[in-house]
Image (cartoon, helix red, strand yellow):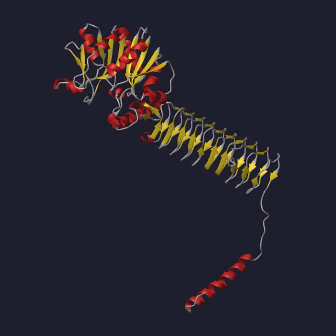
Amino acid sequence: MSFAGVILAGGLGKRMKSSLPKVLHTIYGYPMIQYVLDVLYGLNPEIIIVVAGKHLSKIKNSIKERGSTIFVKQEEAKGTADALLRAVPVLKGFKGTVVVVNGDTPLIVPNTLKRLLTLHKKRMNVISLLSFFASKPDSYGRVIRNKDNELLYIVEDRDATEFQKKVNEVNSGVYAIESEALSILEEISPNKSKGEYYLTDMIGIARNKAIKVDAFCIGSEDELIGVNTMQELEKVRQLMRERIIKKWIDKGVNFMDTSSVFISPNVRIGKGTFIYPNVYLEGNTRIGKGCYIYPNVRIYNSIIGEGVNVKDSTLIEESTVKSNASIGPFARIRPNSIIGKGAKIGNFVEVKKSVIGSGTKAGHLTYLGDSKVGNNVNIGAGTITCNYDGYYKHTTFIEDDVFIGSDSQLIAPVRICKGAYIGAGSTITNHVPSMSLALSRVKQKNIKDWVIRRRIKFGSENLKMKRAKSKGEKA
């Protein structure tokens, strides 16, 4: 089916009381218009045209394009009909159906647009409108039909009579228009009350010309809600969150408390994973099968393998955690890190831009930055890879089967070769050969009876002070 998509994104969003363009307000990390774009991209249009006003460049720079997308500027905000008219020159030579969608309807789904296009073609309409029944139709244009249920025209709420305002079938702002009918846009007159050119007037003009028009009431209010206020934005966030979580429940993901989990739409989760409360899964995160994600965890743009435990209050960013590893509690995995199979990154351990081998353990209070750590390495509590010399970052190499004693500092660049031991409390500045023990401690010195002499000394001094104080003398 040959069609072109037009997204009307010129709304300034004055009622949102924000300097940010309306369509760039985000829902789980993505601007509203991105959701609309992705739906259209998924239907493989020949072209998508985004029409916006003075914020056009900001909108263009804020979205991710996946197909042929052209941006057109509406120099003056003169209404939806004028906005669509700005797109007509770009469509010169295109023969087919033009699907018009508003950029502030992020909950719209591909199946709804597919149904609209199917009915539009089946009925051989020239213009088709997607409508729905609204529980509170106050801000919507009303769909006015005759006694035979034929579409007559659309009347905006501000222009409707009291009788028309009782109609609860409303305009969604989604249209399917055959390209040859776009010339009707030039016949639309400015609205008397606002002085704008309403796209809805196209229906009445077409009807008067005996052009076949229809409205298909196939949408739902929750799906087609348009965002014009911060309250509506919050409502859309809530509806999207519920939609996403329901999808994953249906696919076999377990949740302890669905009301406190937040999952971005591009996240993927494996069957049998259990998610505790207050978890945030963001960006393009991938979670494998059979994982446990414990409370207060945030995972962003990361890949989590199968059978991984991410324990309480852990942050993982732009990293990979391989199968059966354990992370946390209170751990931080910073970008560009890879945690190997069966590895353990414990409480208060920070990993930055490092590769941690399979079976390696860093249980407590450790910093591993710019490091390449082999398999089955034991890293004791308080270990630090000192990667920064004040000017440059350097790499620490720790080969397989190394044992790092607690409270060790590894001064990069340095290599700890296979099977070596680092004694607790050591500062390592040179390479350590394989199967060697490295120590760097001050020799221990024991002073016999030092404690006894100290007690006698201070006991005598305290006694003198007490006597002087009782006599009123200065000690």
Residue name at image x 56 percent, y 44 percent: 315
Name which quarter of the figure residue 128 lies in: top left
Residue at 25%, 30% (x, y): give it: 138
Q: Position of residue 98 (x, y in %)?
A: 39, 14
**Left or right: 10, with 471 as reference point:** left
Is residue 1 visible in the rendered image? The answer is no
Residue nearest the viewer, comparing 162 with 244: 162
Residue 151 image point, x, y percent: 25, 14
Question: Residue 180's spot in the image, x, y percent?
Answer: 36, 8
> Residue 137: percent from the left, percent from the top?
26, 28
Q: How many marks?
A: 0
Q: Is residue 187 above or below residue 363?
A: above
Among the 4 quarters of the image, the one containing residue 406: bottom right
Quadrant showing the N terminus: top left
- The residue most toward the left is 162
| Quadrant position of the C terminus in the picture | bottom right
Look at the image and tell me whether residue 55 can be seen.
Answer: yes
Which residue extends farthest front? Answer: 75
429 or 138: which is nearer to us? 429
Residue 159 lies in quadrant = top left
Query: In the displayed structure, would residue 353 be above or below residue 36?
Result: below
- Picture layout, residue 329 above or below residue 52: below
